[in-house]
Protein backbone atom coordinates (compact mmCIF):
# COMPACT_ATOMS: atom_id res chain seq x y z
CA UNK A 1 0.00 0.00 0.00
CA UNK A 2 1.18 3.51 -0.83
CA UNK A 3 0.28 4.63 2.67
CA UNK A 4 2.72 2.10 4.15
CA UNK A 5 5.52 3.27 1.88
CA UNK A 6 5.08 6.87 2.99
CA UNK A 7 4.14 6.36 6.63
CA UNK A 8 7.40 7.86 7.97
CA UNK A 9 7.90 10.59 5.37
CA UNK A 10 8.63 14.02 6.90
CA UNK A 11 8.68 12.60 10.42
CA UNK A 12 11.42 13.93 12.71
CA UNK A 13 13.63 11.26 14.26
CA UNK A 14 16.36 11.64 16.87
CA UNK A 15 18.95 8.87 17.18
CA UNK A 16 21.57 9.00 19.92
CA UNK A 17 24.92 7.35 19.33
CA UNK A 18 24.27 7.64 15.59
CA UNK A 19 27.79 8.14 14.26
CA UNK A 20 28.41 4.40 13.82
CA UNK A 21 27.01 0.91 14.23
CA UNK A 22 23.31 0.25 14.77
CA UNK A 23 22.55 3.93 15.37
CA UNK A 24 23.98 5.01 12.03
CA UNK A 25 22.27 2.12 10.25
CA UNK A 26 18.89 3.10 11.73
CA UNK A 27 19.51 6.71 10.68
CA UNK A 28 20.20 5.53 7.11
CA UNK A 29 17.02 3.49 6.91
CA UNK A 30 14.91 6.30 8.38
CA UNK A 31 16.40 8.76 5.90
CA UNK A 32 15.49 6.41 3.07
CA UNK A 33 11.91 6.54 4.37
CA UNK A 34 12.00 10.35 4.15
CA UNK A 35 12.56 11.17 7.83
CA UNK A 36 14.37 14.33 8.86
CA UNK A 37 17.09 13.44 11.35
CA UNK A 38 18.74 14.66 14.51
CA UNK A 39 21.84 12.60 15.26
CA UNK A 40 24.09 12.74 18.30
CA UNK A 41 27.49 11.44 19.29
CA UNK A 42 30.39 12.45 21.49
CA UNK A 43 33.02 12.90 18.75
CA UNK A 44 32.37 15.89 16.53
CA UNK A 45 34.50 14.68 13.61
CA UNK A 46 32.81 11.27 13.42
CA UNK A 47 29.37 12.81 13.86
CA UNK A 48 29.88 15.38 11.10
CA UNK A 49 31.10 12.65 8.76
CA UNK A 50 27.91 10.68 9.42
CA UNK A 51 25.79 13.80 8.89
CA UNK A 52 27.34 14.48 5.48
CA UNK A 53 26.74 10.87 4.49
CA UNK A 54 23.08 11.02 5.54
CA UNK A 55 22.45 14.40 3.91
CA UNK A 56 23.13 12.77 0.53
CA UNK A 57 19.77 11.04 0.98
CA UNK A 58 18.10 14.45 0.60
CA UNK A 59 16.70 14.84 4.09
CA UNK A 60 17.43 17.48 6.68
CA UNK A 61 20.10 16.36 9.14
CA UNK A 62 20.95 18.14 12.38
CA UNK A 63 24.12 16.80 14.06
CA UNK A 64 24.50 17.73 17.73
CA UNK A 65 27.48 16.74 19.85
CA UNK A 66 26.02 15.41 23.10
CA UNK A 67 27.16 13.29 26.01
CA UNK A 68 23.92 11.69 27.17
CA UNK A 69 25.28 11.49 30.71
CA UNK A 70 25.33 15.28 30.96
CA UNK A 71 21.96 16.83 31.85
CA UNK A 72 23.01 20.26 30.57
CA UNK A 73 24.11 18.89 27.19
CA UNK A 74 20.88 16.93 26.88
CA UNK A 75 18.87 20.11 27.57
CA UNK A 76 20.87 21.94 24.89
CA UNK A 77 20.21 19.09 22.46
CA UNK A 78 16.46 19.38 22.82
CA UNK A 79 16.55 23.16 22.66
CA UNK A 80 18.23 22.71 19.26
CA UNK A 81 15.60 20.16 18.18
CA UNK A 82 12.76 22.47 19.21
CA UNK A 83 14.32 25.44 17.43
CA UNK A 84 14.97 23.54 14.18
CA UNK A 85 11.93 21.28 13.95
CA UNK A 86 9.49 22.24 16.69
CA UNK A 87 8.58 18.64 17.41
CA UNK A 88 9.82 15.05 17.61
CA UNK A 89 8.09 11.97 16.20
CA UNK A 90 10.63 9.19 16.80
CA UNK A 91 13.27 8.82 19.52
CA UNK A 92 15.86 6.05 19.30
CA UNK A 93 17.92 5.73 22.49
CA UNK A 94 20.93 3.97 21.04
CA UNK A 95 23.95 5.54 22.77
CA UNK A 96 25.83 2.95 24.78
CA UNK A 97 29.25 1.80 25.89
CA UNK A 98 30.75 -1.48 27.01
CA UNK A 99 33.53 -2.43 29.40
CA UNK A 100 36.35 -4.92 29.43
CA UNK A 101 35.33 -8.50 30.06
CA UNK A 102 36.12 -8.68 33.77
CA UNK A 103 34.66 -10.45 36.80
CA UNK A 104 32.95 -8.37 39.47
CA UNK A 105 36.02 -8.67 41.70
CA UNK A 106 38.15 -6.84 39.14
CA UNK A 107 35.87 -4.26 37.54
CA UNK A 108 36.66 -0.71 38.66
CA UNK A 109 34.13 1.77 39.99
CA UNK A 110 35.10 4.09 37.13
CA UNK A 111 34.13 1.48 34.52
CA UNK A 112 30.97 0.59 36.42
CA UNK A 113 29.85 4.22 36.61
CA UNK A 114 30.61 4.98 32.96
CA UNK A 115 28.50 2.07 31.74
CA UNK A 116 25.57 2.68 34.10
CA UNK A 117 25.56 6.43 33.52
CA UNK A 118 25.68 6.10 29.74
CA UNK A 119 23.47 3.09 29.11
CA UNK A 120 20.85 3.61 31.81
CA UNK A 121 20.93 7.16 33.17
CA UNK A 122 21.58 8.55 29.69
CA UNK A 123 18.47 6.82 28.36
CA UNK A 124 16.46 8.32 31.21
CA UNK A 125 17.81 11.84 30.69
CA UNK A 126 17.21 11.84 26.94
CA UNK A 127 13.75 10.32 27.24
CA UNK A 128 12.64 12.75 29.94
CA UNK A 129 13.80 15.70 27.84
CA UNK A 130 12.10 14.32 24.71
CA UNK A 131 8.63 13.79 26.19
CA UNK A 132 7.39 17.40 25.83
CA UNK A 133 8.10 17.23 22.07
CA UNK A 134 6.47 13.82 21.49
CA UNK A 135 2.78 13.70 20.67
CA UNK A 136 0.19 10.98 20.04
CA UNK A 137 1.45 8.67 17.34
CA UNK A 138 5.09 9.10 18.37
CA UNK A 139 7.47 6.24 19.06
CA UNK A 140 10.39 5.56 21.39
CA UNK A 141 12.86 2.75 20.70
CA UNK A 142 15.33 1.79 23.43
CA UNK A 143 18.26 -0.28 22.18
CA UNK A 144 18.88 -2.63 25.09
CA UNK A 145 20.52 -5.71 23.53
CA UNK A 146 19.78 -9.31 24.40
CA UNK A 147 21.75 -8.62 27.60
CA UNK A 148 18.55 -7.12 28.97
CA UNK A 149 17.24 -10.67 29.37
CA UNK A 150 20.32 -12.86 29.40
CA UNK A 151 23.30 -12.97 31.72
CA UNK A 152 26.92 -13.27 30.62
CA UNK A 153 29.94 -13.65 32.94
CA UNK A 154 32.41 -10.79 32.86
CA UNK A 155 29.72 -8.30 31.81
CA UNK A 156 28.22 -7.30 35.15
CA UNK A 157 27.97 -3.54 34.60
CA UNK A 158 26.66 -3.90 31.05
CA UNK A 159 24.16 -6.56 32.12
CA UNK A 160 22.98 -4.48 35.09
CA UNK A 161 22.49 -1.43 32.89
CA UNK A 162 20.56 -3.34 30.24
CA UNK A 163 18.37 -5.18 32.74
CA UNK A 164 17.64 -1.82 34.34
CA UNK A 165 16.93 -0.37 30.91
CA UNK A 166 14.32 -3.03 30.23
CA UNK A 167 12.58 -2.25 33.52
CA UNK A 168 12.64 1.46 32.67
CA UNK A 169 11.25 0.72 29.20
CA UNK A 170 8.37 -1.34 30.60
CA UNK A 171 7.42 1.36 33.12
CA UNK A 172 7.65 4.05 30.44
CA UNK A 173 5.43 2.03 28.10
CA UNK A 174 2.67 1.80 30.67
CA UNK A 175 2.90 5.53 31.44
CA UNK A 176 2.66 6.51 27.77
CA UNK A 177 -0.07 4.12 26.62
CA UNK A 178 -2.86 6.65 27.36
CA UNK A 179 -1.00 9.23 25.26
CA UNK A 180 -0.77 6.94 22.24
CA UNK A 181 3.04 6.88 22.23
CA UNK A 182 4.61 3.52 21.42
CA UNK A 183 7.60 2.28 23.42
CA UNK A 184 9.65 -0.51 21.88
CA UNK A 185 12.42 -2.52 23.54
CA UNK A 186 15.05 -3.45 20.96
CA UNK A 187 16.86 -6.64 21.99
CA UNK A 188 19.40 -7.56 19.31
CA UNK A 189 21.72 -10.50 19.74
CA UNK A 190 25.30 -10.52 18.49
CA UNK A 191 25.68 -7.74 15.92
CA UNK A 192 28.87 -6.86 14.08
CA UNK A 193 29.66 -3.45 15.59
CA UNK A 194 32.62 -1.79 17.31
CA UNK A 195 31.31 -2.62 20.80
CA UNK A 196 32.92 -6.06 20.50
CA UNK A 197 36.34 -4.39 20.62
CA UNK A 198 35.70 -3.90 24.35
CA UNK A 199 34.00 -7.21 25.12
CA UNK A 200 35.80 -9.70 22.93
CA UNK A 201 38.21 -8.47 20.28
CA UNK A 202 38.48 -11.91 18.68
CA UNK A 203 34.73 -12.55 18.48
CA UNK A 204 33.59 -14.48 15.37
CA UNK A 205 32.02 -11.54 13.56
CA UNK A 206 31.11 -13.60 10.50
CA UNK A 207 28.51 -15.38 12.63
CA UNK A 208 26.90 -12.12 13.69
CA UNK A 209 24.08 -10.05 12.23
CA UNK A 210 24.84 -6.82 10.42
CA UNK A 211 23.79 -3.48 11.85
CA UNK A 212 21.70 -3.01 8.71
CA UNK A 213 19.70 -6.13 9.48
CA UNK A 214 18.77 -4.79 12.91
CA UNK A 215 17.99 -1.34 11.50
CA UNK A 216 15.66 -2.70 8.83
CA UNK A 217 13.63 -4.59 11.45
CA UNK A 218 13.38 -1.49 13.65
CA UNK A 219 12.10 0.64 10.78
CA UNK A 220 9.57 -2.04 9.80
CA UNK A 221 8.22 -1.92 13.37
CA UNK A 222 7.98 1.87 13.22
CA UNK A 223 5.94 1.62 10.02
CA UNK A 224 3.16 -0.41 11.65
CA UNK A 225 -0.28 1.24 11.68
CA UNK A 226 -0.89 3.40 14.71
CA UNK A 227 -3.42 0.96 16.16
CA UNK A 228 -0.67 -1.62 16.71
CA UNK A 229 2.80 -1.96 18.17
CA UNK A 230 5.61 -4.39 18.78
CA UNK A 231 6.60 -4.12 22.42
CA UNK A 232 9.81 -6.12 22.16
CA UNK A 233 12.03 -6.82 19.17
CA UNK A 234 14.18 -9.83 20.06
CA UNK A 235 16.47 -10.48 17.10
CA UNK A 236 19.07 -13.25 16.93
CA UNK A 237 21.61 -14.42 14.36
CA UNK A 238 20.54 -17.55 12.50
CA UNK A 239 23.87 -19.09 13.52
CA UNK A 240 22.73 -19.13 17.16
CA UNK A 241 24.58 -17.99 20.29
CA UNK A 242 28.28 -17.20 20.03
Image (cartoon, grey):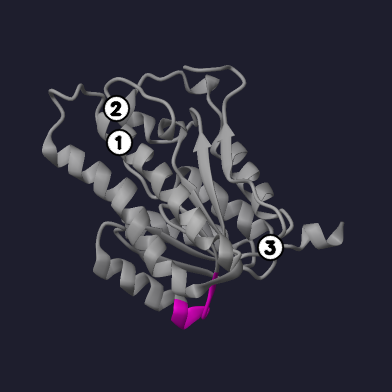
Q: Identify the image quadrant of the N terminus.
A: bottom right
The magenta stretch spans which residues? 82-88
The residue sitting at 24% across, 29% down in the picture is 100
Task: Residue 126: give x, y in percent of width and height.
Answer: 37, 62
Quick check: can you spot residue 19?
no
Q: Earlier in the sequence, mark 3 or mark 2?
A: 3
Residue 44: quarter of image: bottom left
The residue indicated by pointer 1 is 160
Q: Earlier in the sequence, mark 1 or mark 2?
A: 2
Q: Is residue 138 left or right of residue 19?
A: right
Front position in the image: 150 or 79: 150
Q: Is residue 14 left or right of residue 218?
A: left
The residue indicated by pointer 2 is 155
Q: Is residue 65 above or below residue 84?
A: above
In the structure shown, which secondary structural element does the residue marked by tag 3 occupy? loop
Name the front one of labels 1 and 3: 1
Amino acid sequence: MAEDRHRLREKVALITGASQGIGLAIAHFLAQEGCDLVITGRKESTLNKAAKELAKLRVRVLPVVCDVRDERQVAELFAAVKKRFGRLDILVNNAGVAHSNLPVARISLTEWNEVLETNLTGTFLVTRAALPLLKRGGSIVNNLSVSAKRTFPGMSAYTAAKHGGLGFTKALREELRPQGIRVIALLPGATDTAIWDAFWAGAPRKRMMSAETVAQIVVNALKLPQDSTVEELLIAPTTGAL
